[in-house]
Image (cartoon, rainbow, N blue to C red):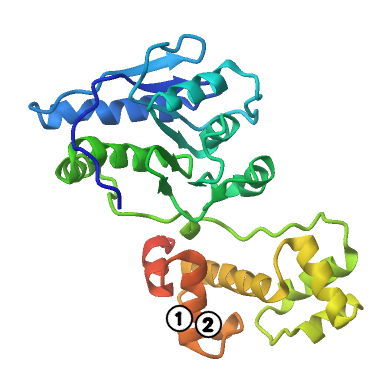
């Protein structure tokens, strides 16, 4: 983990009121930082500024944050904010984003050949728009030194705690998290994402195989079996299936089975061994390894965190 000086920056920290910026994130992050001098009167308060996109400071800033958008629009390459962000970063500003805010950093060229994250549901769109970014949507937050990106709509809390740690140290993170009743530990976005494979690809043999897998995921499903369902040769089936869904059949089947197991863990009372059997695993440790590789959690930890409370 990078080591930083634990001092609040002297230059302004700018929360950008970009077109469509989510109010809850904009003001929530401002409120989070405003708590620091209340919890520790000896700590220097940030020079925090909420700035409309057309009224941004021209002088160097310490950091700037693009927040989630409540609109479906994406930044145009010639938007003045894009050039402003690139210039500020070139002058040493820390560039940050939450959720779809990463599209602004991407458009400014600040994420090329670097690690970053965004909301898991935006993965395909983001990869298409910025193929040179090393996207890691399974992570809630990615710190790449002078660029910090956070994933989900509420990940502004994760970003706020992370920046607090940079500027004020770990003790302040703990105090702030306790005051706000939020979890300061590192979370992973993949525990919250859902497996929603494409079905509008137009390849009917592949769609037939997908529907067969939906109905029979608990049965042994081999490439020869699925190729027969699709009425294709094995080699042709693997090629068609991977092109249409973005995943080879074995990886797709594992993701499907884990998704079914997640639902059972959230809503049912069956044992983990029974759930493993029901979704097609005859070896419980193998199921646990597969489950953790997809969600980042063991089946037991997942059930404890996400089980729907009854009554």
Query: x and y percent of residue 6 in the render?
Result: 19, 37
Residue at horizontal 19 percent and vertical 30 percent from the top:
36
**SS at badge 2:** helix
Tag 1: Cα neighbours inside 10 Å, few (<14), some, or many (≥20)? some
Which one is nearer the viewer's eye here, 64 or 294?
Answer: 64
Query: x and y percent of residue 168 in the render?
Result: 19, 36
Whether residue 19 is visible to the viewer of this picture, yes or no, is no
Return the residue at label 2: 276
Classify 223 as above or below 49. below
Task: Quadrant for residue 60, please give it.
Answer: top left
Tag 2: Cα neighbours inside 10 Å, few (<14), some, or many (≥20)? many
The answer to whether the residue labelled 2 contacts the one labelled 1, judged by CB atoms less than 8 Å apart, is yes
Classify 278 as above or below 32. below
Return the residue at label 1: 272
Query: x and y percent of residue 98 in the render?
Result: 46, 37
**SS at badge 1:** helix
Side (left or right) of 239 relative to 184? right
- Spot the residue most to the bottom: 282
Residue at horizontal 24 percent and vertical 41 percent from the top:
4
Classify 113 as above or below 285. above
Q: In which quarter of the image is the C terminus?
A: bottom left
Which one is nearer the viewer's eye here, 178 or 174?
Answer: 174
């Amino acid at each position: 983990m990078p080591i930083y000086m634990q001092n609040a920056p002297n230059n302004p920290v700018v929360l950008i009121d970009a077109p469509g910026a989510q109010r809850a994130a904009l003001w929530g992050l401002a409120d989070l930082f405003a708590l620091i001098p209340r919890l520790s009167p000896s700590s220097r308060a940030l020079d925090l500024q909420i700035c409309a996109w057309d009224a941004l400071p021209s002088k160097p800033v310490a950091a700037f944050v693009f927040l989630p958008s409540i609109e479906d629009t994406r930044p145009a390459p010639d938007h003045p904010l894009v050039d402003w962000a690139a210039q500020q970063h070139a002058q040493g500003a820390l560039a940050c984003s939450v959720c779809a805010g990463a599209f602004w950093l991407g458009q400014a060229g600040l994420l090329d050949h670097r690690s970053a994250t965004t909301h898991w549901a935006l993965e395909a769109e983001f990869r298409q728009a910025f193929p040179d970014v090393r996207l890691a949507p399974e992570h809630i937050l990615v710190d790449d030194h002078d660029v910090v990106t956070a994933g989900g709509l509420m990940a502004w809390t994760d970003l706020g705690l992370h920046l607090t740690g940079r500027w004020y140290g770990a003790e302040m993170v703990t105090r702030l998290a306790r005051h706000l009743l939020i979890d300061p530990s590192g979370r992973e976005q993949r525990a919250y994402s859902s497996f929603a494979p494409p079905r509008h690809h137009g390849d009917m043999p592949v769609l037939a195989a997908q529907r067969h897998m939906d109905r029979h995921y608990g049965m042994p499903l081999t490439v020869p079996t699925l190729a027969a369902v699709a009425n294709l040769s094995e080699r042709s089936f693997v090629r068609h299936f991977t092109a249409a869904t973005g995943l080879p059949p074995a990886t797709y089947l594992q993701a499907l089975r884990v998704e079914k197991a997640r639902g059972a863990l959230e809503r049912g009372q069956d044992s983990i061994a029974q759930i493993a059997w029901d979704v097609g695993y005859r070896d419980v440790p193998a199921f646990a390894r597969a489950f953790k590789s997809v969600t980042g959690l063991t089946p037991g930890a997942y059930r404890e965190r996400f089980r729907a409370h009854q009554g």
